[in-house]
């Protein structure tokens, strides 16, 4: 078990992050494997209204789910192709701040910058 360094993010008004996976690996053996298994996002501030956007959109087999950022809430989801996700456009006047980290399988990606736990 290991964890990559924490990443701080800021989504200023008008910004977004396109749909992606945090680990593009299918079977644990391709060049796209980075060992990420679980993604954690910790929100540092509130987005007060749904109309302000900046939600985390998760696309899973049951459908699409939007998570509105709320201070001190955590979002945890699979980092691989089971959970494509994106950050919707920030239509509010305030920035969205979050801390993210990834829990990693060191056997899949021994070159990962992860720290053993």
Image (tube, rainbow, N blue to C red):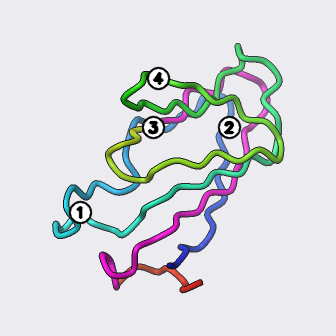
Would you identify the image quadrant in which residue 62 lies? Answer: top left
> Callout 2 environment at 10 Å: few (<14), some (14 to 19), or many (20+)?
some
Q: Earlier in the sequence, mark 4 or mark 3?
A: 4
Residue to which mark 2 is pinned: 12
Decide: is 117 above or below 29. Answer: below
> Callout 3 environment at 10 Å: few (<14), some (14 to 19), or many (20+)?
many
For residue 70, side relative to residue 4 (left or right) = right
Name the residue: 74% across, 22% down: 92
As helix, strand or loop, the secondary structure at mark 3 comes to strand
Query: How far separated are the C-alphas under marks 4 and 1?
Result: 25 Å
Magenta segment boundaries in residue numbering: 86-110
Decide: is 73 above or below 36. Answer: above
Q: Identify which residue, 112 or 17, lies in the foreground.
A: 112
Query: How far separated are the C-alphas under marks 2 and 1?
Result: 30 Å
Is residue 99 inside the magenta stretch? yes
Q: Where does residue 97 sit, x and y in percent of width and height? A: 73, 46
Residue to which mark 1 is pinned: 32
As helix, strand or loop, the secondary structure at mark 2 comes to loop
């Amino acid at each position: 078990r290991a964890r990559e360094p924490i990443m701080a993010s800021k989504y200023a008004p008008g910004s977004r992050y396109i749909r992606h996976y945090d680990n593009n690996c299918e079977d644990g053996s391709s060049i796209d494997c980075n060992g990420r298994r679980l993604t954690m996002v910790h929100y540092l501030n509130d987005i007060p209204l749904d109309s302000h956007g900046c939600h985390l959109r998760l696309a899973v087999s049951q459908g699409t789910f939007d998570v509105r950022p709320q201070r001190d809430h955590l979002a945890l989801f699979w980092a691989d192709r089971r959970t494509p996700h994106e950050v919707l456009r920030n239509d509010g006047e305030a920035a969205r701040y979050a801390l993210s980290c990834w829990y990693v399988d060191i056997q899949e990606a021994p070159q990962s910058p992860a720290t053993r736990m």
